[in-house]
Image (cartoon, coloured by chain):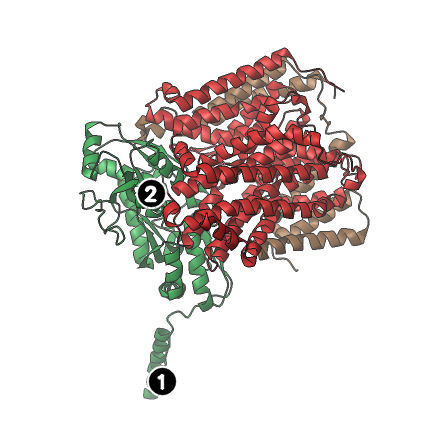
Amino acid sequence: MSTLRVLFSAAALIATLIVGAADASAWEPKQPISIVVGFSPGGGTDIIARHIASTAQPTIPVPIVVLNKAGASGAIAAETVKNAKPDGYTMFVAGGSESVSIGNHRKLPYDVRKDFTGILQITRQRVFLTVKADARWKTLADMVAEAKANPGKLSFASAGAGSSYHSIMLVLQKLAAVEMKHLPYQGGAPAVAALLGGHVDVSPHNPEETQAMYDAGRVRYLAVASDTRSPILPDVPTLREAGYDIYIENIKGLAGPAGMPQDVVAYLHDKFKAAMESDTFKRLAAQANLELQYRGGKDYMDAMVAMFNQIGKVVSPQ
Amino acid sequence: MRTMTTDRAFGVAVMLLALAFILFAVPSIDDDWKKAVGARYFTVGPRYYPYLAGILCFVFGALIVLKPQAWLPDFTPPTSPAGRRAGLVLAISAAYVALVPLLGFEAASFFMLAAFLYAFGVRRWAMLISVSVLAPVAVSLIFLKIFALKLPSGLLPLPF
Amino acid sequence: MALVLQTLLNIAEPLNLLALMIGVIGGMIVGAIPGMTVTMAVALSVPFTISMGPTPSLLLLLGIYCAGTYGGSISAILLNAPGTPANAATVFDGYELAKQGKAYKALLMAIIASVYGGLFSALVLIVVASGLAEVALRFGPAEIAMLVVFSLTVVGVLSGESMAKGLLAAAIGMGMATVGTDPMVGTPRFTFGIFDLYDGFAYIPLLIGLFALNEMFVQAEGAFRTGGAILPLKGADPEGNRVTGEDLRRSLVPMIRSGFLGVFIGILPGLGSAIATFLGYAETKRASKEPERFGKGAIEGVAASEAANNAVTGGALVPLLALSIPGDGVTAIMLGAFLIQGVTPGPLIFIRNPEIVDTVYLGVIAANVMMGVVALFALKPMTAVLKVPKVVLYPVVLMICVAGSYAIRNNLFDVFVMLGAGVLGYGLRLFSVPVPPLLIAFILTRPLEESMRQALVSSEGDPLVFLSSPISTAFALLAVAAVLYTGWRARRGRPLPTE
């Protein structure tokens, strides 16, 4: 082999590397991309999908379509995406009950631990343990003490059997060694009504569900099930501070089927991350009361699986 | 239709179906909910309402057998010309619903409309063709453009 | 008062009136298409409101909400296909009137009743909003359960010729409602591994199948021959198509009663306008001296159901405004629209944003007035649909029903459900089993099962929980009284047929 050829080969190799590095995402979409939403149009998850899609659209050469496939608390959308080709054209808004909670309560046609590829996390929705303002407990410790002394006397509402909200209360009961009665409702709004009417003692809620009642001084928050305190409500302690290692919330983001090629994931991640960091998206997010939180694809998947396993340790899958 | 036998037969059929529902369908529901975490305060399980519905169906089926109606104003024997026409529309509808996933909404609707109109005696070809072509396209466009909803496209590749 | 005047002038701005008009027309069209729901229309228009000010966006959404609830009556009367779940009871007499050549009259009465229901609910909203919201909170599981049990007694009223068959239909509806995930412990029931069934049968495909598809099979028996049943034109029977003083006199009390019922159901979260319209219709029939006229073209049947569903609109806005708790899908999305405008509904909205409260109050009134005007102008064009030969009309309706059933969840499974419901409805009809009790039991079973089991969890299995509060005891007694009354009436025997 001549020196010249070696040199040429080396140059070609270097050139490939440079070009490759400059354009890490050699992949370009050729057909419309769909973002499947597991809930009806107009809901919180739908709004995230529509805002990120409209912000990212100018940078992506093909149309981004938001497809609402409501049903089974978002699980129909997850199932649709699991069965789709991992070619980057189908993804769903993950990170809710369908990803981290329901699979622990009943058999699902997918397994969050192996059936999806994370693209990125976009928002977080914290869960606050909410009580009426005139409840007799000042702190979570007071409530736990009363629950311990009277097993089964206190009751809690949830947005549905098997939801993240239900699971948070189950994990808390296990760690605090208390027993409470569970009244599942169809969604967060009726659960707020039940709490305000005094039909349950405590209920886990996203802050936007109870914002108005909090402002009016009719509900209080005992704790938040997050890893850190909320910047908006810094006085509410986390469950971890209270001694219960619970970190479960809605971490909404995008995920595709398992086995998506690296360059495809990188392309989508970069485009959506840029969209997420744009002023347009930040303004839309502020209007819709979304708290932004970014995680890369792998970290996002790991966070979901960690929450899933946290619940799984308490609720054995049936 | 003046027949108590028909109504009695209906009541018996309802009773048999209800019995099958109670004996086979309801017991197929998992009954291990008591084992679930935090379920010890539940007293009524998932089988309660299905059982209730099944038992009520059985009881009311029995009531129909005991007191059959002598006159069923809407009863159309499937073998009569009227019954056959209803059966034909039912078959067209079923074929249509089966074809939508395969051919997509527009193509399946075209075949359904053409078959429907032809079967019920429309022989003005200009009208038959124009309705069959224009109506699906119009509906599909309205859903897509105004409601931003895409109606199903088929699995089979079509030449048009 | 100055603020009210200012709000009024604000609403009267041309651009704001335009937004209201677009909402009303759009709502009417969407409402009239079977399968397209008001919820969907509101959801799809929220993105457009982001760049608008609070007044035009609220007017747009309120216009869609009020007019969409009315719009479903158009297809219910003309095609036997209720456009939204809220218009299901309108078909019973509305379509009968259309078949008698009195479509114009039925449509006109639907407008009158809808506008009345909407305005009445607006009045309630304005006068007693915050107080009523607090009453709604006192409805816990036991109270809801007994209210639903009382509502179930209307099955007896809707049963028709044979009580046993009406009750059978209700039992079938109850069984169908248990399909899907158990509401309390999450166990799947009768889903056979089909994941699309986890939420049970969707209500709208069921409704379309049981009414519209069923009617198509019936029309097929007669080979879709035009003439005969439907005489569409006002000109064909101008006398029969007038809404006479006698009609108004008959409809007055039913409309007032339905107005109260609708507002009441609307205020309670999670029950919805479909239940209100059935209750309004059934209570009118129960109170009538001539119940045998119902289902055969009684004008007050149309008035009762349409007044009830539009009265729900103002009622559902009560907990939304006063407590920030949406009672149904539409108000849930409207809550989001409020937030986008930087307004949080709740106890403080009356202090922080009184102008928004006034805009909603006056907006509901304006939406209903506008709806009445637009609907009157649209009356003639609407009846034109009946000039289409039936043999062309029905296959096209079949196509729209398939598209609508699919569009609800972008799911083909719902199309299969619709076809199955059509076949079931036709089969039941052959044996004179009435469909309305099936539907009412279907929509009531889920709230009944949920609230009853919740109450039993709270009481640790003690059934006396259902008599533990004055409200639940009152509804329990009402339910018993209703059953006794129906039984007494049946024993006394039907009045002799007048013909």
The quadrant in which the C terminus of chain C is found is top right
Nearest the eye: A278 or C256: C256
Amino acid type of the residue that numbered disc 2 sits on in the rendered structure: Met
Spot the residue most to the right.
B124
Does residue A91 appear left or right of residue A239 in this picture?
Answer: right
Secondary element at tag 2:
helix
Q: Where on the picture, by quarter, is residue B39?
A: top left
Tell me the residue that label 1 is attached to.
A8
Nearest the eye: A314 or C127: C127
Residue C346's label in the rendered image is none
Nearest the eye: C197 or A115: C197
- What's the distance in space between the residues labelled 1 and 2, CA to CA? 72 Å
Q: Is residue C69 above or below residue C249?
A: below
Q: Is residue B50 above or below residue A56?
A: above
Spot the residue most to the front.
C2
Which of label 1 and label 2 is nearer to you? 2
| Residue A282 visible in this rendered orientation of the protein | yes
Residue A286, horizontal then vertical, whole percent:
36, 58
Could you tell me if the residues under marks 1 and 2 are in contact, i.e. CB atoms within 8 Å?
no
Secondary element at tag 1:
helix
Residue C201, horizontal then vertical, whole percent:
52, 36
Residue at horizontal 69 percent and vertical 47 percent from the top:
B112
Q: Where on the picture, by quarter, is residue B159?
A: bottom right
* Chain identifier, brown in the render: B
* Chain identifier, green in the render: A
Chain for disc number 1 = A
Tell me the residue that label 2 is attached to.
A213
* Chain identifier, red in the render: C
Does residue B147 appear left or right of residue B48 in this picture?
Answer: right
Tell which circle, 1 or 2, labels the residue nearer the N-terminal end. Answer: 1
